[in-house]
Image: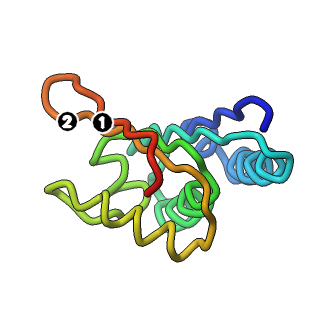
Amino acid sequence: MSGYCIISGLIAALSPETGKFCLELAKAAGKYGTRISFDLNYRESFWKGRAEELRALFTEIASITDILIGNEEDFQLALGSPGPGGRWREHFREDRKLQGHDRQRAACIPEGLGICYNPFARW
């Protein structure tokens, strides 16, 4: 495995072209064994009129991501994850089963006063 590919949801949401670029970048990185980090960076203003398109795009990128970064609201709005109440963990365990891969997955979810839950453990 060589290095990391870091993708920002802000770039992915800028336009259909940048979204497609981010998806292709993630696919290419995965093909060559590079770990993929995806920071959801949900911003409502970027999603106006494109919610269905972007949710599908973000879900596809997240499905091949090793490290997924966001808060609970990001997971709910960008990926349609269930919430509130911490049910995102079950969502990603199920997602991993559906995707059929054994990649190590981690999610960074602030819990409480700036504490980051980031297990870096198999889901």
Residue nearer the viewer, 107 or 48: 107
Q: In which quarter of the image is residue 120?
A: top left
Please name whichever residue, 67 or 123, is drawn nearer the observer in this view of the structure. Answer: 123
94 left or right, relative to 50: left
Q: Position of residue 31 (x, y in %)?
A: 84, 53
What's the residue type where badge 2 is placed? Answer: Glu
Task: Indicate the position of residue 116 as horizontal and vertical percent values.
Answer: 29, 30
Q: Residue at image x 59%, y 38%?
A: 37
Q: Do the residues labelled 1 and 2 touch (CB within 8 Å)?
A: yes
Asked which colour scheme the image uses, the reply is rainbow
Question: Label 2, on which residue?
Answer: 111
Q: How crowded is mark 2: few (under 14 residues within 10 Å), some or many (20 or more)?
A: few
Q: Earlier in the sequence, mark 1 or mark 2?
A: 2
Residue in the image at 44% along x and 46% along y = 121
Q: Which residue is at a point 61% across and 55% down the rendered structure image? A: 103
Q: From the top left corner, tell me how far across and down residue 105 is, in percent.
A: 51, 50
On screen, residue 90 versus residue 58, left or right, reads left
